[in-house]
Amino acid sequence: MAAPAATAEPIRDLIETLRGKRSWRQLEQDCGGNPSRKYLSQWISQPPEDFPSMAQIQGLSQGLNIKPAVIVQTWGIALGIWTSSDWGASQYYLLDGWTDLTTSQQAAVAGVVREMRTPKA
């Protein structure tokens, strides 16, 4: 069975969602200049060939205010290494502050995420 083709969609969704209303210049600055706007543009428009460098992962993590593991997970999905379902419940542990939430708050967050991922009928 052939590996799935790489796609830019998961990366584009992650970056564009968390960029919010910031300009690309502002996001580049929030990332500490690494990755550059050139790479950001490339990542949202072209399927990846490989993972970004560790410095780019750390910079993007800083700029998007997420854990580096979320970026690695997203790239792995984009590269076809694994699917989002491979992560199961462990994906929630990648959220900043997850361990600070009560059990009922964690259940509420997980429920919202599951509902958002449910395909439209």
Image: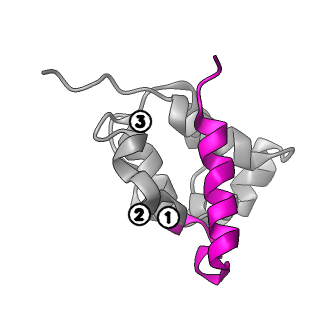
Residue 31 appears in which quarter of the rendering? bottom right
Which labelled disc corresponds to residue 42? Answer: none
Residue 65: x percent and y percent? 68, 64
Residue 26: x percent and y percent? 80, 52
Instruction: Assess disc 2: are there few (<14), some (14-19) or many (≥20) residues with their C-alpha within 10 Å of its C-alpha.
Output: few
Which labelled disc corresponds to residue 54? Answer: 2
The residue that label 1 is drawn on is 68
C-alpha distance separating marks 2 and 3:
17 Å
Horizontally, residue 87 falls left or right of residue 121, namely: left
Horizontally, residue 121 falls left or right of residue 67, namely: right
Residue 114: x percent and y percent? 59, 45
Instruction: Assess disc 3: are there few (<14), some (14-19) or many (≥20) residues with their C-alpha within 10 Å of its C-alpha.
Output: many
Horizontally, residue 3 falls left or right of residue 65, namely: left
Q: Earlier in the sequence, mark 2 or mark 3?
A: 2
Q: Residue furthest front?
A: 104
Q: Amino acid at mark 3?
A: Ala
33 or 88, which is in the foreground? 88
> Residues in magenta?
93-121
Q: Earlier in the sequence, mark 1 or mark 3?
A: 1
C-beta proximity under 8 Å, tags 1 and 3: no
The residue that label 3 is drawn on is 78
Residue 85 appears in which quarter of the rendering? top left
Residue 69: x percent and y percent? 45, 63
79 is within the stretch colored magenta: no
Q: Residue furthest top?
A: 121
- Tell me the quarter of the image containing the N terminus: top left
Q: Is residue 31 visible?
A: no
Residue at x 67% of width, y 78% of height: 101
C-alpha distance separating marks 1 and 2:
9 Å
Q: Amino acid at mark 1?
A: Pro
Q: Secondary structure at mark 2?
A: helix
